[in-house]
Image (cartoon, rainbow, N blue to C red):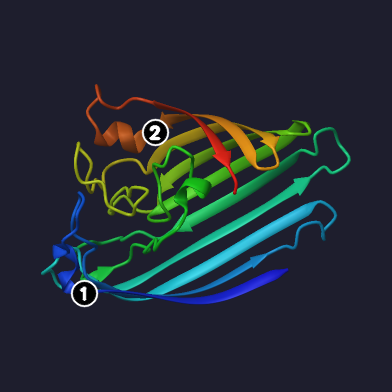
Amino acid sequence: QATDLYFLARNVSAGSTAEVTSSSPSGGATPRDIYTLGLRVKSTPGKLKGWDYGVELAGQLGNFSDSANGPRLDHRAYAASASGGYTFAKAFGTPRVGLEYSFGSGDSDPTDGDHETFENLFPTNHKFYGFMDFFSWQNVHDARVTGSIKPLKKLTLTLDYHAFWLADTSDYFYQVNGAARRTGGYGINPDAGNYVGSEIDVVATYAVTPWASAQLGYGHFFIGDYVKDTLTADRAEDADFFYAQVVLNF
């Protein structure tokens, strides 16, 4: 087993929002001093006769401001993730099936002077919470079923299914970059259902050479009660996503 214990500090000054850059958008994050203490354990590949697992727990303390000159709120938040799977090493294509659950806390009361939304820091959300990049590790429950198989030596097929809920509808629905959705009808809507929707992702990866691979992917998002209750009827629609890429390794 690999075991990681980590401590991360993110300190942003009040001048960050006025940062001048050569490209758009300009300006940085709002002021905050957030400290994260976490524990991550993960099984060593091939040591458990086909089984694998991973668990991560993180807690945060500090302060947070939603604007450049806004009050500093006491920050208390936490997150957790657990996964497990099994690889059929002797079956055709060595298929693997797995389950995963991720949780990031939300703010149950935006008016109480405390900030309880987990600070997502700088992750690779794309890999964990759906390829369509609708979600981050904030104010979310994500239940995931995943599977993969190699029908050919150089071809890998993967299938992921996610179901998403907001941890608390008194908080925002957060984007993949950690920003709250505040426009287009979105905002804090405590009367909405907390089921946001589900996503299915299908990816095919072909290893052309040891240094080049090609990949095709498709995703579909099925909207849930939260989207239907938040957006007007003519805007609440499912979404599709398709991509193709070639990767060259040097």
CB under 8 Å between callouts 2 and 1? Answer: no
Name the residue: 69% across, 58% down: 53
Residue 5 x/y as whole percent: 57, 76
Instruction: Give the residue at mark 1.
Output: 13
| Residue neighbourhood size for the residue with mark 1, other residues' Cα within 10 Å, grouped as few (<14), some (14–19), many (≥20) | few
Instruction: Give the residue at mark 2.
Output: 224
N-terminal-most mark, 2 or 1? 1
Name the residue: 71% across, 49% down: 85
- Viewer-side label of 2, 1: 1
Determine the residue located farthest toward the top in the rendered image.
Answer: 234
Determine the residue located farthest toward the right in the rendered image.
Answer: 90
Q: Is residue 156 above or below residue 75?
A: above
Q: Secondary structure at mark 2?
A: loop
Residue 97 x/y as whole percent: 71, 42
Q: What is the distance, in whole Å, between disc 2 and disc 1 at their CAs?
A: 38 Å
Picture quarter containing residue 118? bottom left
96, 208: nearer the viewer: 208
9, 102: nearer the viewer: 9
Residue 211 x/y as whole percent: 65, 42
Identify the amino acid type marked 1.
Answer: Ser
| Residue neighbourhood size for the residue with mark 2, other residues' Cα within 10 Å, grouped as few (<14), some (14–19), many (≥20) | many
* Image quadrant in which the N terminus is located: bottom right
Q: Is residue 98 above or below residue 19?
A: above
Q: How many marks?
A: 2
Q: Is residue 5 above or below residue 24?
A: below
The image's mark for residue 240 is none
